[in-house]
């Protein structure tokens, strides 16, 4: 629970009442590696805060897995669109490694939102961060070469680069597996 409190304290200081609210609304949950956390087509009823491990979010297109999200500890995950709009999600979330997370239900999320302006600002900040990440990925795809995207990824997420399969990493970066292998060997020289 300390990691989630630290993340929230990046936005505002937590009072004792806030600590109690988090303890009463976020529940611990573990996922062994390769566990499907959420299947495509389901309604997202929880959001998660990843305290330990790596999670990927993906969907299938033309029989291929397209990895859209790679999350490591210290980040929220889940199908935000499905959660907020209460419609079926179009993504699959899977534990890449053994994971420990905290989940908050839609009902408890609404309780948190009603707990004051600072919580609404935090939630808006979380949504904005998610949108900013998506926009940054789009800009990278439009303006950077495959090699540049991989270098940026290494700088921003070195632990993910070491713990995610080449297939998943290539998909996330929009690179063919063989091209990523070639780029990696060029950079090692």
Image: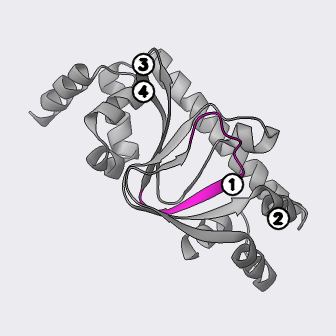
SS state under label 4: strand
Q: Residue at x 59, y 60 (%)?
A: 49
Residue 52 magenta-drawn? yes
Distance of label 1 from label 3 (alpha carbons): 28 Å
Mark 2 vs mark 4: give the one in front: 4
Q: How far is the residue under mark 1 from the one under mark 4?
A: 23 Å
Which quadrant is the C terminus positioned in?
A: top left
| Nearest the eye: 27 or 187 | 27
Left of 152 or right of it: where is 50? right
| Earlier sequence position, callout 1 versus callout 4 | 1
Q: Which of 52/35 is in front?
A: 35
Q: CA distance from mark 3 to mark 2?
A: 40 Å
Q: Residue at image x 71%, y 35%?
A: 88
| Residue at disc 3, secondary structure | loop
Q: Which residues are magenta?
A: 39-53
Q: Residues within 10 Å of mark 2 (few under 14, many from 20)?
A: some
Residue where numbered disc 4 is placed:
65
Which of the two labelled residues, at mark 2 and mark 1, occupies the earlier sequence position? 1
Pointer 3: what residue?
A: 63
Instruction: Write the residue at 28% across / 40% down.
Output: 165
Residue 56 versus residue 97 in the image, above or below: above
Report x, y in % for residue 95.
44, 51
Pick whichever, 147 or 27, lies toward us.
27
Q: Which residue is mark 2?
A: 112
Of badges 1 and 3, nearer the viewer stands 3
Identify the residue under disc 1.
46
- Which mark sits nearer the N-terminus, 2 or 4? 4
Measured Cα–Cα span from mark 2 to mark 1: 13 Å
State if disc 4 and disc 2 touch (CB < 8 Å). no
Kind of element beneath mark 1: strand
């Amino acid at each position: 629970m300390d990691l989630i409190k630290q993340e929230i304290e990046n936005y505002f200081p937590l009072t004792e009442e806030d600590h109690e609210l988090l303890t009463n609304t976020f529940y611990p949950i573990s996922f062994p590696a390769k566990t499907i956390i959420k299947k495509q087509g389901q309604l997202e009823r929880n959001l998660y805060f990843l305290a330990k491990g790596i999670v990927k979010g993906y969907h299938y297109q033309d029989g291929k897995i397209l990895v859209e999200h790679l999350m490591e500890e210290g980040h929220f995950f889940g199908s935000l669109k499905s959660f907020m709009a209460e419609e079926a999600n179009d993504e699959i979330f899977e534990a890449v490694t053994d994971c420990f997370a905290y989940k908050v239900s839609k009902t408890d999320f609404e309780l948190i939102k009603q707990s004051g302006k600072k919580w609404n600002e935090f939630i808006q900040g979380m949504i904005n961060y998610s949108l900013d990440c998506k926009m940054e990925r789009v800009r990278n795809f439009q303006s950077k070469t495959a090699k540049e995207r991989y270098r940026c990824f290494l700088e921003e997420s070195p632990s993910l680069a070491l713990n995610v399969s080449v297939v998943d990493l290539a998909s996330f970066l929009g690179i063919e597996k063989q091209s990523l292998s070639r780029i990696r060997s060029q950079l090692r020289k």
